[in-house]
Image (cartoon, rainbow, N blue to C red):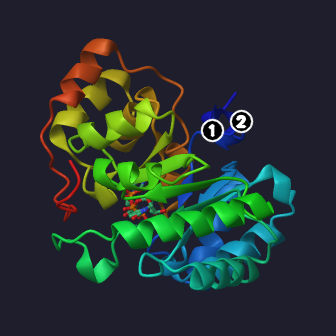
């Protein structure tokens, strides 16, 4: 069985395919359409998009044209980080459904606890996030999102909505790759039985030629990205790789090997070479 057919169970009992296809930076139109169509053809059944990727129309069209039954595809989209009030959330959610040409999503996430412009400001949106979570619960209870969750939430942000939630988030999607595994929020998320998802599992491409991972990759006779993705999965974290090159899309799903415990320890100790700009509240 391919990894693309395997699932994790979410805390509401729903199944979520263990590897997703990421769509950030894929331009609406031919680029996003072709990439998603190719991923579905190869066997990916979990697609991760967001209002803010501005490609929901092409993602929805590719899903529709694939001929695959809607219920056989797990589709995630995200609420814009700037939008925190009840009425605007419900309106935005419906607009996402319309653009995706579907009447439900499998997972709806709050994209971030802070508006993007405030990403590194030492300011919290606690009241706004509690209001947003209540609207997310309303959407969940309407059945139009089969699961709800958060993204970029740190321990403080999760504890903040924990005060009021009647539905626990099913997922927390955070930046997570070899060298940047955010131990505090990762452990807290797992302790609540919330599925951790790894965004930028290849450090937005920065890990593709990482020399320390290369040594391990040679041992297993696989590519560096395959080691990086398998590392994430062996931590029970769900990777969301993005790729436009067909050979990348295909090889990223060839993960039928096991990294030894000793090599996992070596990978655990590697420094962050991703050169990404991290959110300062995480860690
Ligand atoms: N929630 C959030 O705030 C958030 C933030 C960032 C990302 N995300 C999600 O996470 C997804 C993935 O993160 P990301 O977009 O930063 O990128 P990523 O998956 O970490 O890396 C993508 C880059 O790696 C390259 N690549 C992929 N497979 C490869 C392979 N086998 N060999 C060599 N190079 C390879 C791709 O090149 P080619 O295109 O040339 O194939 C692309 O340049 C996003 O698309 C999005 O869905 C969420």
Position of 260 with respect to 17 (left or right) is: left
Numbered label attached to residue 199: none
SS of the residue at dot 2?
A: loop
Residue assigned mark 2: 13
Q: Whole-percent x and y of residue 262? A: 25, 13
Which residue of the protein is positioned furthest toward the left in this rendering?
271
Q: Residue at x 25, y 56 (%)?
A: 206
Residue assigned mark 1: 10
Quarter of the image for residue 189 reads top left
SS of the residue at dot 1?
A: loop
Q: Residue at x 66, y 50 (%)?
A: 44
- Label 2 neighbour load within 10 Å: few <14, some 14-19, many 20+: few
Q: Whole-percent x and y of residue 269? A: 15, 29
Q: Nearer the viewer, residue 257 or 197?
A: 197
214 is higher (above) or lower (below) than 70:
above
Position of 19 with respect to 206 (left or right) is: right
User: Ligand 1: which quarter?
Assistant: bottom left
237 is higher (above) or lower (below) than 40:
above
Ligand 1 within 8 A of label 2's CB?
Answer: no
Position of 253 with respect to 213 (left or right) is: right
Quarter of the image for residue 103 reads bottom right
Q: Nearer the viewer, residue 131 or 152?
A: 131
Residue 70 appears in the rendering: yes
Q: Residue at x 46, y 35 (%)?
A: 192
Q: Residue at x 64, y 72 (%)?
A: 34
Alpha-carbon distance for marks 2 and 1?
5 Å
Quadrant for the N terminus in the image: top right
Residue 201 appears in the rendering: no
Q: Are marks 2 and 1 in contact (CB under 8 Å)?
A: yes
Q: Whole-percent x and y of residue 85? A: 52, 80
Q: Whole-percent x and y of residue 203? A: 29, 55
């Amino acid at each position: 069985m391919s990894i693309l057919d395997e699932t994790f169970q979410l805390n509401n009992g729903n199944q979520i395919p263990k590897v997703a296809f990421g769509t950030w930076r894929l331009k609406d139109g031919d680029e996003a359409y072709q990439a998603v169509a190719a991923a579905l053809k190869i066997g990916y059944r979990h697609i991760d998009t967001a209002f803010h990727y501005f490609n929901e129309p092409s993602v929805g069209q590719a899903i529709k044209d694939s001929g695959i039954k809607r219920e056989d595809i797990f589709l995630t989209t995200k609420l814009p980080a700037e939008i925190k009030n009840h009425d605007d959330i419900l309106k935005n959610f419906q607009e996402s459904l319309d653009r995706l040409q579907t009447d439900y999503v499998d997972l709806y996430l709050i994209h971030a606890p802070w508006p993007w412009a405030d990403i590194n400001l030492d300011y919290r949106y606690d009241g706004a996030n509690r209001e947003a979570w209540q609207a997310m619960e309303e959407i969940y209870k309407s059945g139009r999102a089969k699961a709800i969750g958060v993204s970029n939430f740190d321990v403080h942000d999760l504890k903040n909505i924990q005060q009021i939630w009647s539905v626990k988030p099913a997922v927390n999607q955070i930046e997570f790759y070899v060298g940047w595994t955010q131990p505090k929020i990762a452990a807290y998320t797992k302790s609540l039985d919330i599925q951790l998802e790894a965004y930028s599992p290849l450090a937005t491409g920065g890990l593709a030629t990482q020399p320390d991972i290369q040594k391990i990759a040679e041992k297993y006779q696989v590519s560096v990205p395959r080691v990086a993705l398998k590392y994430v999965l062996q931590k029970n974290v769900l990777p969301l790789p993005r790729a436009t090159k067909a050979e990348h899309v295909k090889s990223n799903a060839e993960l039928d090997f096991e990294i030894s415990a000793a090599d996992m320890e070596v990978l655990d100790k590697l420094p962050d070479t991703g050169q990404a700009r991290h959110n300062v509240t995480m860690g």
